Amino acid sequence: MIEDNFKGWRRIICPFNEFFPRGDWQPDSADKNANLDFPIKSFQFEPRPESKGGVYFDDLELTRK
């Protein structure tokens, strides 16, 4: 989870080992096995319910360390 308490652009790095499947909802086509199954076909960023305003992404990339 990221606290959105800033204005302007910010670089945010999300380590892949911190990604997780949602426990409260999965699409009907998902395996629903609580694992990240490969290939990963989609992902989403979801604002918290109390969020206001907009979030813009300039660049997303998946890299190896």
Image (cartoon, rainbow, N blue to C red):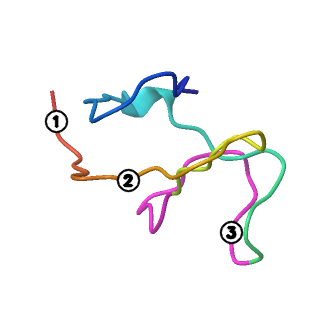
Q: Amino acid at mark 2?
A: Tyr
Q: Is residue 15 left or right of residue 61?
A: right
Check contact, mark 1 vs mark 2: CB within 8 A: no
Which is more toward the observer, 38 or 1?
Answer: 1
Direction from residue 59 to residue 36 in the image, left or right? right
Q: Position of residue 3 (x, y in %)?
A: 55, 23
Question: Magenta stretch: residue 37 in it?
Answer: yes
Residue bearing the label numbered 2? 56
Q: Examine the rendered structure and indicate whether residue 1 appears above or below residue 33.
A: above
Q: Residue at x 61, y 50 (%)?
A: 46
Q: Is disc 1 placed on a helix, strand or loop?
A: loop
Q: Quadrant of the N terminus?
A: top right
Q: What percent of the width, then of the height, locates residue 30?
A: 68, 68
Marks 3 and 2, how far apart at CA = 27 Å
Query: Residue 44 at what x, y percent from top left?
Result: 53, 56
Asked which secondary structure carries label 3, the reply is loop
Q: Which residue is mark 3?
A: 30
Query: Could you say which quadrant of the image residue 64 lies in?
Result: top left
Q: What is the magenta segment's predominant secondary structure?
A: loop
| Residue in the foreground of this view, choosing between 20 and 45 | 45
Of the residues shown, which amino acid type is indicated by label 1? Arg
Q: CA distance from mark 1 to mark 3?
A: 26 Å
The secondary element bearing badge 2 is classed as loop
Residue drawn at (44%, 28%) of the image: 17
* In the depicted structure, whether residue 36 falls above or below residue 5: below
Q: Residue 39: x, y in percent? A: 41, 63
Q: Mark 1 — residue?
A: 64
Q: Which residues are magenta?
A: 29-43
